[in-house]
Amino acid sequence: MCAAREGRWGRRRRALLLCCVLVAAWEAAWGQLRYSVPEELPKGSFVGDVAKDLALEMAALRARGARVVSQGRTQYFALNANSGHLVMAERIDREQMCRMLEKCVLRCELIVEGEMKVYAIEVEITDINDNLPIFEEVLVQEEISETTVVGTRFPLAEAHDPDMGSNSLQSYALSGDEHFSLSVQAGADGEKRPELVLTKALDREEAAFHELLLTASDGGEPARTGTARIRVVVLDANDNAPAFSQAVYTVRVPEDVPVGSTLLSVTATDPDDGTNGDVQYSFKKRMDFFADFFQLQPETGEIELVKNLDFEEGDTYEFLVQARDGGGLSDTAKVSISVTDVNDNAPEISVRSALSEISEDAAPGTVVALVHVQDRDSGGNGEVRCSLGEGVPFRLERALDDYYSVVTARELDREQASEYNVTVRAADGGSPALRSSAVLALRVLDVNDNAPVFAEARYSARLPENNAEGALVLTVRASDADWGQNARVRYRLREGRLRGAPLSSYVSVQAETGALYALRSFDYEEVRELELWVRAEDGGAPPLSSNVSVRLLIADENDNAPQVLYPPAPGSGAGAGAGAVSGWAGVELAPRSAEPGALVAKVVAVDADAGQNAWLSYELAKATEPGLFRVGLHSGEVRTARSPMARDAARHSLVVLVKDRGRPALSATATLTVVLAESVAELLSELGSAAAPAEPAGSLTRWLVLAVAAVSCLFLAFLLLLLALRLRRWRRSRLPPPPSGTLRGVPASHFVGIDGVRAFLRSYSHDVSLTADSRKSQLRCAPGSCCDTLPPPDEPAPLRGEHAAPQRAAGTDALTPIQTGHECFQGGNIYILTGQPVPVSHLPHHKEFLPKICLV
């Protein structure tokens, strides 16, 4: 029997393959191959002759290379390179691959790489009857009361066959008992539903159990079947159904009732005995929604909470419960659970629209945010009160229902607060109230509404005179409360003039830093203080500015030496330091009978500086007779320190040092000539004599007179010798006009050198001092050291008491001879014995100090 069945299956497979080949050949003619193969073919099974159907040569396929590509990860088909056949690469289960599809088609492509061609191939997988109908439960037990009415139907479990078409489930059959029959109903979806029909009344006393066999068959050849055993248990008669104590159960619970709490209990009673009186509780209709919140205990009827309730999600739950006894009779009741609201939801604040920036000049009432506030609670718990944080220039205004506007309550000032964190608070009406808040961040944009402000109301500085050009005087500082470009401060001077010149020529201000610099060196004696204004201007549009007064005080420096006003002098000079000396001259008369402390003269001096730099003090620096005179420290008065004595010289030279109190101190000197005489005539006589003031030598005076006489004679002889030499040369030849350095036709070469004169004078105790400075050269001679000489015959000159100004000779640094007025010279020219003219204007100007050297 099995051999015959396999023979029929083989013939059927060959016929199916032949049909597939014919279909494939017809499709190849249209450029696409289609094959049909049954499922469950082993790997390597023939599908179709691709080479033949596409008219491809095997040699060309092998040479050019060809392969089959399937969609997806699994390759179900392959190309046999030797035969050109399309074969199975994997076993295919149609029920697994094309579940619930009437037609199962797999697609692949043949790629000929040498020709760069691709051919589409479709393979239909046909169903074979390889699955039999299967019941989910092979043993089914049905309990039927003996009082069940004939004709009652009981649904039976359905069988399932995954095959398709005629190979699927086709029919049911029931065998085993006369009390029951089978009825197959066709559903709307075409499925067959078996039902067990009671055809004869049951009697538990005859048979407590009935064994039935349900067979399901498909339409395959051969047909396949599946069976399930049905055991019918005949139950005792249950003539009383359970009854609930209430038709409707109602309960009110707060929404915050804890999970696990028993909300209520339902109760049903059954007067039957045994299992007929045992009641089980259940939900009439299984609703997942209610099952998520409630659980019904089947034994006790208690309804427990398994999930937190939320009044806002649902305030009422209604469902049916069923009480079923052991005999299958049941009763239903309605359960209604009402949820009461609890203040468990805080107000919700959401910002619908908000500004992140606002200008500080925004008008009051400008809207900066739109806020929506709601509370999911109901009643008083859902009533919301809104407010803003304290200390902010904003207020709330109701816009629409639950909407509020946050607006400015007054003008803003960025300098007081550059940004605000506005807190919107909401509280509901519950007890206790729940609160929530939201923060709005708002930045205030700057407006140029603040002018620069200087750190000081008035600036002042002291600057020492003789400062370096470009010296830093002071720095003014101004700050601007604005921000960014509006706070950038620049400085400049306000226009003004000082001593006819603009202020900008005296000082300048650095625009960025406010540093004030001196552009010139100041002199306290010219400018003692400077008043100017500095303007600070910000970078706003339009810019704002402010001014500040700056007072610059020039501090005095000790840069001026004292100036001697008396005794007067034709020239003056001063040097820095305590040892600086300038030549001043004056002649004063002091009676020989003067008492100690008698006023002789007064030195008057001034200092252009100020303060202690101008405080002068006087002291006697040098005197011919120390101890005879004294000088007042602050008055400059020259007084006798003692009474003059007979041995005191008639003429005294006093050098008074005038010194200020600067650091370092500067000084000047004044030279006074004091003549001890009783009358003016005696004074003039003393001044007219050629004798210089004798040194207080006492007994040495006589010896000095003798020495001077001897020197004078020798000097006269020397002059006569020079004259003879001059006459000799004149006779020898007439010389051209003498140069500018000659004396009345006598060549300058006739005079001996300066060294010879010095040696000559030194040997006769002459004190000669020659320097290049015209104001410091001196020559002193003892009285009677020079005899009078005759003046040239053509130039007589009277006695004169003044000196001609020296003049420079052309092309030389020496000065031409000066005309003197001393009676000894008689208008002649004074020469030092050199080969060229030497300046003699450096000699003391007073005739009493002129040397007794007379040259013709």
Image (tube, grey):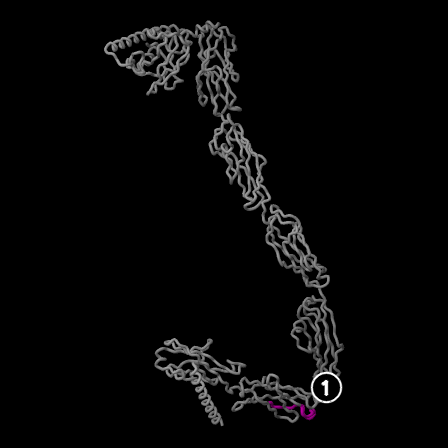
User: Measured from the top left, where is residue 272 in percent x and y?
Assistant: 74, 84
Relative depth, front residue between 694 and 467: 467
Q: Taking 54 as reference, is 435 above or below it?
A: above
- The residue pinned by badge 1 equals 238
User: Measured from the top left, where is residue 120 in percent x and y?
Assistant: 44, 79
Q: Residue 779, located in which quarter of the rendered image? A: top left
> How many marks overall?
1
Quick one: label 1, few (<14), some, or many (20+) residues within 10 Å?
A: many
Relative depth, front residue between 495 and 764: 495
Q: Taking 280 as reference, is 550 above or below it?
A: above
Q: Amino acid at mark 1?
A: Asn
Q: Taking 762 as reference, is 517 above or below it?
A: below
In this picture, residue 245 sits left or right of residue 119: right
- The part of the chain drawn in magenta is 198-214
User: Is residue 188 in sight in this rendering?
Assistant: yes
Quarter that holds the C terminus: top left
Q: Residue 86, located in which quarter of the rendered image? A: bottom left
User: Measured from the top left, where is residue 846 in percent x and y?
Assistant: 42, 12
State yes or no: residue 368 in magenta: no
Label 1 sits on a secondary structure element that is: loop
User: Is residue 707 in sight in this rendering?
Assistant: no
User: Measured from the top left, where is residue 175 in percent x and y?
Assistant: 61, 92
In this picture, residue 172 sits left or right of residue 658: right
- Tell me what residue is drawn at x 31 percent, y 7 percent: 714
